Image: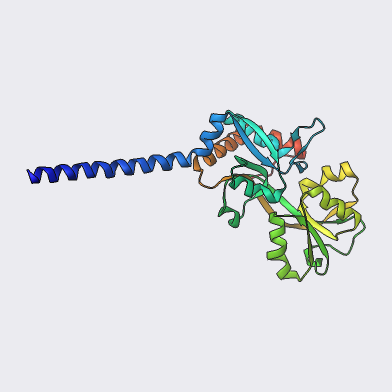
């Protein structure tokens, strides 16, 4: 009788262990799928953008957000069968906001870096931007980053460009002063006014700002680096990332991505 009771106890214990394991797997699967399930259940994806970075994402004349990033985000949302809701935030607050759940995703020229990969997850890149030195039209003293020593250089706060200036370039060329800004327009305004000597930014961002504001500035030299931007989501959501990647891949395969790219940059996307 004791033997039967012992066997029964062993069987019950085994069942409980197996049930616990099964429960853990289910919880993990649910956790992995939280972001995707949430947006599809709500029928809406909250997308963080700077909102001041033409032609990528900015407030249009109709008081609606528009731009390359906005069109890409809208198309992703459409293919996930949800609506896109845009919330603007200074770039330095985008990633912390994503981590706190303020946004479901970021589509705002968030460059993929090894450091950021530790904090957030990325889709496949949806654009590659060449970054150049930008100076006033009458400035012939700065022709490349090698001429930054002793100068004042403006850059977006919390951006990959700021990290590049501090960690990579300054040790190489010598000390220079870094002035940080919350948006690109103010950076270029200060450059045009002579309050800073130079800045760095990607070439696609220059044309519309110069045309609209009449800034007397120019890009000089060869590209100093090429940054790949991607959709960013909260860490630990592989199914959400997979769904976004599928949407991006389908956009490229059916010609939608090319159409959006030409609309905003006036040229076909470079070959991958």
Residue, far right:
138
Residue at the image position 82 percent from the left and 69 percent from the top:
150
Q: Where is residue 24 in the image (x, y as percent from the top left)?
A: 37, 43
Residue at the image position 80 percent from the left and 30 percent from the top:
62
Residue at the image position 23 percent from the left and 44 percent from the top:
14
The N terminus lies in quadrant: top left
Where residue 139 sits, quadrant-wise, is: bottom right
Where residue 220 sits, quadrant-wise, is: bottom right
Instruction: Specify whether residue 60 is in view.
Output: yes
Q: Where is residue 98 in the image (x, y as percent from the top left)?
A: 61, 45
Q: Which of 268 and 213 is in front in this view?
A: 213
Left or right side of 175 for 8 = left
Left or right side of 207 for 114 = left
Instruction: Specify whether residue 255 is in view.
Output: no
Q: Position of residue 198 (x, y in %)?
A: 83, 59
Figure check: 199 above or below 17: below
Q: Which of 259 and 200 is in front in this view?
A: 200
């Amino acid at each position: 009788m004791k033997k039967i009771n012992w066997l029964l106890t062993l069987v019950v214990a085994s069942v409980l262990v197996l049930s616990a394991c099964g429960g853990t797997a289910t919880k993990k699967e649910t956790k992995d799928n939280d972001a995707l399930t949430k947006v599809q259940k709500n029928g809406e994806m909250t997308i963080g953008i700077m909102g001041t970075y033409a032609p990528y994402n900015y407030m249009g004349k109709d008081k609606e957000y528009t731009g390359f990033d906005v069109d890409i985000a809208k198309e992703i949302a459409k293919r996930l069968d949800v609506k896109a809701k845009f919330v603007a935030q200074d770039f330095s607050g985008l990633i912390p906001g994503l981590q706190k759940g303020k946004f479901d995703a970021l589509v705002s020229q968030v460059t993929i870096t090894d450091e950021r990969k530790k904090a957030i997850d990325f889709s496949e890149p949806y654009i590659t931007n060449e970054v150049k030195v930008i100076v006033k039209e009458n400035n012939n003293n700065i022709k490349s980053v090698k001429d930054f020593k002793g100068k004042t250089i403006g850059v977006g706060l919390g951006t990959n460009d700021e990290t590049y200036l501090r960690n990579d370039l300054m040790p190489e060329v010598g000390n220079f002063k870094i002035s940080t800004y919350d948006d690109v327009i103010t950076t270029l305004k200060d450059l045009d006014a002579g309050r800073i000597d130079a800045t760095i930014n990607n070439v696609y961002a220059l044309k519309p700002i110069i045309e609209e504001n009449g800034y007397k500035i120019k890009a000089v030299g060869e590209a100093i680096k090429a940054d790949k931007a991607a959709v960013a989501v909260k860490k630990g959501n592989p199914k959400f990332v997979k769904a976004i990647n599928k949407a991006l891949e389908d956009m490229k395969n059916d010609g939608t991505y090319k159409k959006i790219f030409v609309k905003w940059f006036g040229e076909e996307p470079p070959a991958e």
